Amino acid sequence: MPRIAIIGGGISGLSAAFTLEEKRQSGAQSDTKIEYVLFESAPRLGGVLVTDRVDGCLVEAGPDSFLTEKPWAADLCRKIGLGDQLIGSNDADRKTYIVVHKNGRDKLVVMPDGLMFMVPTKILPTVFSPLFSLRTKMRMAGEWFHPPHKADADETVAQMVERHYGPEMVDRLADPLLSGVYGGEASQLSVRAVLARFADMEAKHGSLGRAMLASRKKMGAKSPARPLFSSLKDGMQQMVDALLARLDPAALRVSSPVQSVIPHSTADGWIVSAGYQTDQFDAIIVAAPTHAAAAVLEMADKNLAEELSAIRYSSSVTVTLGYDENVRRSLLPGFGFLVPRSAGHRMLAATFVHNKFPHRAPQNRALVRCFLGGARDEEILASSDEQILQIVRAELREIIGLEAEPLFARVYKWKSAMAQYSVGHIERVARIQKLCEKFPGLALAGNGFNGIGVPDCVRSGTEAATKVLSQLGMWSAA
Ligand SMILES: Cc1cc2nc3c(=O)[nH]c(=O)nc-3n(C[C@H](O)[C@H](O)[C@H](O)COP(=O)(O)OP(=O)(O)OC[C@H]3O[C@@H](n4cnc5c(N)ncnc54)[C@H](O)[C@@H]3O)c2cc1C
């Protein structure tokens, strides 16, 4: 009976395990039986998906939702019986502010209507927005006539955005939006890996504004409006719990860090070393962050390990503060605010959770979730929870005048958890895939390759499982 090992029990590894479990159950009545074992170094499964309940509020330690337009996470939720638990963000209240620091003061300026990611598609709201200087508004008007341009090589998001709209757009929108998603910087992240759609639009249409409008018209005709973000009624942890309820408990080994995986020297297959034990498998799925995958695969292939460890990761900190109803009444409407680097704060963004997902806080509570860290502030991890709280409270005072004492506070630190797709990432992933071809029965999954969001990780885990099953001759798409 073929045995498959999965290394890493975050959402990528659990999605791979679920695909294998489906196969295991379908094979129970036939002669295509399989066995799998999932190794997780931490004492719990789920990786960065963690939901706590505090004072009647639902507190997300890691991701709080996922993009609705990427279907893989919601599809998996439906498969594991959570279809009726899926919820959408409260888009009627969707308003995001940008912190603009002027004359020694912070001001919150609402992002103008019609911005698609950072591309303006409506003229009037942009013309009248105080977010941009006259110079940038002139650039936006000129952008409409940008000629098609196919870059010969990859470049940073900042380079592309600056070419179209100038440096203010990078500081006020591109950088804060990317630090919210990747904990990364526009001046480092690869446009082809992070905003492939922009590179295609520029090559075909020239103007990003015209291209966005054209695609919106096409989409608008086809699909009804959906909420931008989806999540689960009881939080992201619900996805982990439902997956675990469907997996074979005997297959799950927590507190089991894998030190190495090595191809068997005399037979097909792999030797996995975890703790003082070694075990033999026919195939391996490595679903850990690439820095951990590199360490595990070092003895198997030095070049592969080098390529994997060249993918950088940033760390992040989330801080959730709970307040009473007076604060709730005094806070602005909308989903929260983003903090450009030029505003001179350590906070990257804050979400007003009670507005974005109203049922996550009772009517008499306000829930504010703040993000810190990212590629430019790795040092924050060295601060104590107490120091981080002091920073957050001081900055909330400066930015939104929030003086009140929180009823509770939770700080979560995530070390090297967010992959940074730097220039040349796509080519690096292609090289990694090529190096893996030497090893039939090896598949990689996780947020280091083709998407950092939860849906992309679900897809990567599922694809890794189908890859090894098909290499073992046990998968047919039918
Ligand atoms: C603070 C934060 C907020 C986020 N917000 C969002 C959001 O709102 N929406 C969204 O779509 N995405 C969000 N993301 C991104 C997304 O959540 C992650 O990219 C995704 O969950 C990563 O899943 P994973 O399984 O690939 O990795 P992880 O969750 O990191 O899991 C990897 C697992 O591998 C284990 N491991 C490592 N080495 C070994 C070893 N040697 N042996 C055994 N096990 C090992 C680790 O302990 C870990 O449990 C956020 C991420 C963070 C950190």
Image (tube, rainbow, N blue to C red):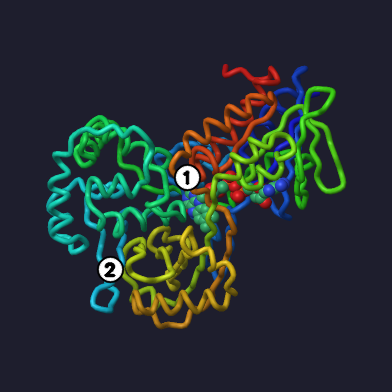
- Residues 337 and 428: in front is 428
Hey, what amino acid is under mark 1?
Answer: Tyr
Counting from the top left corner in percent of width and height, residue 346 is at: 43, 69
* Residue at x 13% of width, y 47% of height: 141
Counting from the top left corner in percent of width and height, residue 308 is at: 60, 41
- Among the 4 quarters of the image, the one containing residue 345: bottom left
Hey, what amino acid is under mark 2?
Answer: Val
CB of residue at label 1: within 8 Å of ligand 1?
Answer: no
- Asked which secondary structure carries label 1, the reply is loop
Badge 1: how crowded within 10 Å, few (<14), some, or many (20+)? many
1 or 2: mark nearer the eye: 1
Does residue 63 show up? no
The quadrant in which the N terminus is found is top right
Asked whether the beta carbons under mark 1 and mark 2 sit within 8 Å of each other, the answer is no
- Among the 4 quarters of the image, the one containing residue 125: bottom left
Counting from the top left corner in percent of width and height, residue 244 is at: 68, 44
The quadrant in which the C terminus is found is top right
* Residue at x 66% of width, y 26% of height: 468
Q: Which residue is mark 1?
A: 421
Q: Which mark is residue 100?
A: 2
Relative horizontal placement of residue 202, taking residue 472 as reference (left or right): left
Badge 2: how crowded within 10 Å, few (<14), some, or many (20+)? many
Relative horizontal placement of residue 421, taking residue 471 as reference (left or right): left
Does residue 6 show up? yes
